Image (cartoon, rainbow, N blue to C red):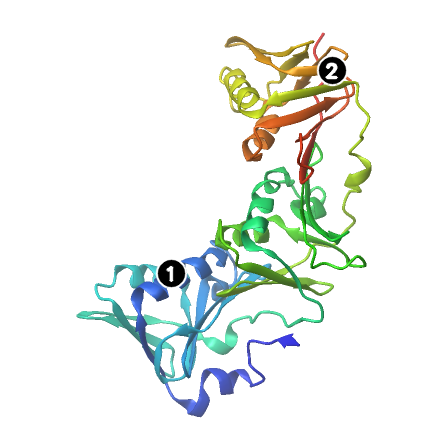
Amino acid sequence: MRININGGRSREERFFPGKKNMKLSMDKNILLENLNVVGKVVPSRTTKQILECILITAEEGGVKLFANNLELGIETAKIAASVAQPGGVALDAKMFIDIVRKMPGDLIQIDSDYSNVTRIKSERSEFKILGQPAEEFPMLPVVEKDREYAVRASDFKEMIHQTIFAVAITDAKPVLTGELLQVQGKALHLVAVDGYRIAYRKAADENLRDDDSINVVIPAKSLSELGRILPSDGEDALRFHFTDKHILFELLNYTLISRLLEGDFIRYSQIFNEDFNSYVCIQRSLLLTSLERASLIAKEDKKVPVKLSIGHDNIIITSSTELGTSYDEVPADIDGVTLDIAFNPKFLIDALRVIADEEIIITFTGSLSPCIIKGRDNDSYKYLILPLRLKS
């Protein structure tokens, strides 16, 4: 099966069947809800004006909306509308959304002529704006649907939230500006690496086969936009399909297609060392608030380390800057050797903020080796953070 939003017809046939003007009416609030979602994909700055547009197409039974920034594209399911004449037009996204939002009534009428002049009307308010030809809008790629994978949409939203903060923000190694999505061992694995830390999350799925093996890297921007659209709860499924260059995500009301990043991702599983010399069981919220307090005296533009002194029954957290010093003690259950180790506090705070468990495990090997944060009775996540060298 193939996804082809042209429906097997030429663009001319789809957007201008019978060479008639587009004319439709529909619920304003439903249109605005879908515009707000699709509009998130529209780039704020681009050299191609057509990419700043949302494409609206009308056919029997409803309308569809499209946006495409050439990295991520989105298509709505058919939205209920009364269509008097099928057709299509591309309209400036910001202007279109703002106009619809400010319209006074519950019903909105849209029609466009051969020159793409589009009239938007509700009650006694009316706008006329110049659109662009629908056939010039870059359509979403065709994606084969030979093998379907699925996960609960709310679970995948959480996976994105708990990993995306560790994606690299520079293009020094472009593949690290995305996240590795693996399908392996009847589980989905999502991994982000920025060179200083690793964020790992998995979700088991018994519907996956033992021989399933997929490794693709999805741009962080695409995952971020997907995360905004996905529901926070419920049982709705997120279905996805792969090609060599693209991944397609299917939700109940939206289809998104993202390009994939090329390059070799870090072999992260080899970096998570199970050996340790110090084993700490600690309350996540206590450690988090202590680290946040230690960060208060550091200027935001400076990477001031915090020092963790691992004792026998507590961790002492200290920081020192030209503005002052801080001292905090956090009780913990500790086995192993005592040690002093320093970190960029932001890296620890980022991980602790997204963990849902209250009781966590942190393992240390030495003052110059990374620590690993994981759940006490939960192996669905783990974080690796490199330390900073302590000043003598």
**8 and 21: which is toward the camera:** 8
> Is residue 225 shown above or below 344?
below
> Which mark is first along the chain, 1 or 2?
1
Q: Which mark is residue 200?
A: none
Residue 201 screen position, x and y as percent:
66, 42
**64 and 221: which is toward the camera:** 64
| Residue under the point 68% across and 57% down | 260
Compute the Cα span from label 2 to label 1.
Answer: 53 Å
The residue tagged with tag 1: helix, strand or loop? Answer: helix
Residue 33 screen position, x and y as percent:
38, 60
> Which label lies toward us, 2 or 1?
2
Q: Which residue is mark 2?
A: 335
> Is residue 218 shown above or below 390?
below
Q: Which mark is residue 33?
A: 1
**149 and 303: which is toward the camera:** 149
| Residue under the point 68% across and 53% down | 205
Residue 328 screen position, x and y as percent:
55, 10
Residue 337 screen position, x and y as percent:
77, 12
The residue tagged with tag 2: helix, strand or loop? Answer: strand
| Three-letter amino acid code of the residue under disc 1 | Glu
Q: Is residue 252 left or right of residue 194?
A: left
